[in-house]
Amino acid sequence: MDGSISFDKFYNIINNSKVSSAKTYHGIDPSTEEDLWEVPIATEDDLNKAVAAANDAFKKWSSLQQQERSRFMKDLADHLEKHKDALTELLSKESGKSMPFAESEVEMGINTMRRHSDWSVPDQVQKDTEDVKIVVQHVPIGVVAGITPWNYPFQLAILKTAPALATGCTVILKPSPFTPYTALKIGEIAAEVLPPGVVQVLGGDDSLGPWMTKHPGIHKISFTGSTATGKKIMAAASETLKRVNLELGGNDAAIVTEDFDVQEAAQLVATATFAHSGQICMATKRIFVHEAVYNEFMTHLVASVTSYKPGEGFCSPIQNKVQFEKVKAMYDDCEQQGLDFAVGGGSKACVDDHRPGYFIAPAIVTNSPESSRIVREEPFGPIVPVLTWKDDSEVVERVNDTPTGLGATVYCRDKKRAWRISEGLQTGSVWVNGGLKLDPVALFGAHKQSGIGGELGPLALKYYTNTRTITYWKDRLEGPEAKGNKGLFA
Ligand code: NAD
């Protein structure tokens, strides 16, 4: 690569080369509905070339010492940091996030890359007697396809790349067609730092994902997106028995007990619900408030949420038109079902037709039956139902009554009670007294139809490896690797 990166020209990155394509398309700025830059649509031939390069690169990359890979990853983090301002601006354009919000995503991604560079999955000695030694090794799976959605295009691309690189896998990223821009630049920046074929990025149309999931030269799919697509990916991956990581949709609940400061709870819940207009997998999507504090809680919640203005702070536009229509339909369903709105109303009341952009004002629904769509489904927009409860075990049962199990938040002062409630929840994460917290060291996994496997932290690395168990009889070994010498056979 020539070393210069411009943030208004976009290429697929194959074997460290910038590759254009006969066919192109462009994203749309969700704040203005203006066209963004053209990006190439990868062909099946492009994918085949990338897969061949990734397999070739895997031979060397996987045989490097962890410290050597770590140096490359730190270097990549430094190069991303060098372009932080341009990446932030690009992310803000493609996703509709405000600049501070976009900046925090870019920082989180760079930090994630740095932290993962320090981790590996060490061999585990299972048995070591006079005669026999048994060692389990965790060996890199091979070529990983990272398929990502549109809500966190930068951070999620890094979340696929970092554990793969740390374990010795090579990566081909496929960003959402709605938000291809920052991921393509990750590829370009990586090409300045990493050997060819280690990180490649392909933008494309709806054919590209299915080509990847059936490709025999790809060994693992690491996917973040909707549960519906996750199921298709798992079915397609079964043809070649690819490994899968699936980070899927959720319907996260917040449980507010009566012993927590009501005003503080309302403010924390409002942020965890409406940040990025609800387009966060682990945003609160059902609010369960103890009946003893319900009225007071609603007063504070309504006061907070009515101060939110679409387009200001974290009230981003909906990222794309397809999702905008889905969100509007959810508002209208609540209206048609005759549900009460404590804030907002149907889509007509919440969308300003004279303003460009996919903006919709927040809404809070109060008397929704638990069978209603707004309680059962993930709206992925700024609308939420509030429900009441009176008994701890009852609320846990109701929160668990969903096919998904991504996360939940508990607001409770009493430590024992908070712990008891948390342990009853069938979710991959539980946050106590504050939501929306991901830490690079902590595994982010899921229960039920919210996913398989996990990401973040040293524990997630094993999902990028196969195990190899070596059993050997010490007395039947000869030569320098025999009993008492250094190395695996020591
Ligand atoms: P989506 O499932 O529509 O698309 C995600 C990605 O999959 C895109 O890149 C898309 O092009 C690709 N894709 C679509 N069909 C495919 C196929 N058949 N084979 C291979 N790839 C295919 O999801 P979305 O609308 O972009 O994102 C929103 C969803 O993502 C929400 O449900 C949200 O909860 C979920 N999400 C989950 C997490 C998590 O960590 N659990 C994080 C962010 C978003």
Image (tube, helix red, strand yellow):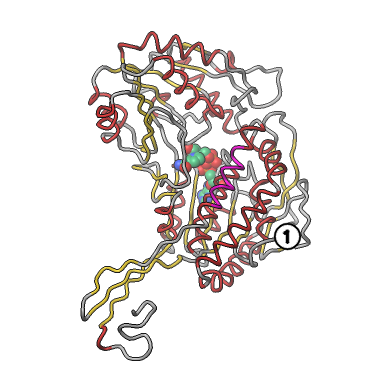
Inspect the magenta stretch and tell me whether residue 111 lies in it.
yes
Is 479 on the left-hand or right-hand side of 305?
A: left
Query: Which residue occupies 25% across, 31% down?
Result: 420
Query: Which residue occupies 37% across, 30% down?
Result: 432
Is 239 on the left-hand or right-hand side of 208?
A: left
- Whole-percent x, y for residue 256 in the image: 35, 21
Query: Which residue occupies 67% across, 18% down?
Result: 353
Q: Quadrant of the C terminus?
A: bottom left
Q: Residue type at mark 1: give it.
A: Val
- Whole-percent x, y for residue 154 in the image: 60, 45
- Whole-percent x, y for residue 485 in the image: 35, 83
Looking at the picture, does residue 263 appear above or below residue 134? above
- Whole-percent x, y for residue 352 in the image: 65, 17
Is residue 28 shown to the viewer in this render?
yes
Query: Which residue occupies 62% across, 27% down?
Result: 317
**Callout 1 environment at 10 Å: few (<14), some (14 to 19), or many (20+)?**
some
Is 14 on the left-hand or right-hand side of 215?
A: right
First to last magenta residue range? 104-114
